[in-house]
Amino acid sequence: MYVDNRLSRSRAFRPTFDNKAVAALEEGDTLVITTLDRLGRSAQNMLAFAEALRSQGAGLRVLNLGGRDVDTATPMGSTVFTAMAALAQMELGIKRERITDSVSERRAAGKDLGGRRQAFSGSQIRNALRLIESEEPVAQVAWDLGMSRATLYRRIRELLPPHGG
């Protein structure tokens, strides 16, 4: 099993998939993927990939197609794969539109777009230090601030003057 964690399908290069999974395929092997939309960025990209697999003598199985093998070497399998690749590309386009619309609406309404907070004031870090000194667990204080323990420790070190000088 090969997994590329936390990589967007919009990335052209997926190190584990490209360098390990595909490279490990031999004639007669079958590549199994969970969903067709994880295979490529466009229907053209997916069709070219399927052709490359076929020329290598490897098969392709997509689990979200009812668990059936899609044999792109047959006219029926090739047609089904082509149609599903086009639908996956359309679905991706619809998702992008929804995300873009949602971000635009939130931005226009002045709402938070989420993501990591960019800065914490010295006052916030000093208050966090007070909580830690009053025996509040560091992990909980960091969690409440929305940062890792390592970041909290680093920010405390940056805020406090060095000792022994």
Image (cartoon, rainbow, N blue to C red):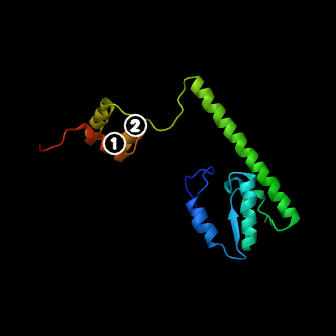
Q: Write down the residue under mark 1.
A: 152
Q: Residue farthest to the right?
A: 75
* Residue type at tag 1: Leu
Residue 104 falls in image quadrant: top right
- Give the position of the C terminus as an image quadrant: top left
Q: Quadrant of residue 79?
A: bottom right
User: In this view of the protein, can residue 137 be seen by the observer?
Assistant: no
Residue 17, position as x, y percentages in the image? 60, 63
Q: Which element carries disc 1, helix, strand or loop? A: helix
Where is residue 27? Give x, y as percent: 71, 77
140 versus 77 height, above or below: above
Q: Are marks 1 and 2 in contact (CB under 8 Å)?
A: yes
Q: Which image quarter is the N terminus in?
A: bottom right
The residue depicted at 74 percent of the width and 48 percent of the height is: 89
Residue furthest to the bottom = 27
Q: Residue at x 27, y 40 (%)?
A: 158
Comparing 17 with 127, the one in front is 17
**Drawn side of residue 93 relative to residue 70, left or right:** left
Q: Residue at x 77, y 54 (%)?
A: 85
Instruction: Name which residue type carries label 2.
Output: Leu
Label 1 Cα crowd, 10 Å radius (few <14 / some 14-19 / many 20+): many
In the image: residue 78, left or right of residue 99: right
Relative side of 105 to 115, left or right: right
Kind of element beneath mark 2: helix
Q: Which mark is residue 59?
A: none
Residue 145 marker:
2
Q: Residues within 10 Å of mark 2 (few under 14, many from 20)?
A: some
Where is residue 97 drawn, in percent x and y?
Answer: 69, 37
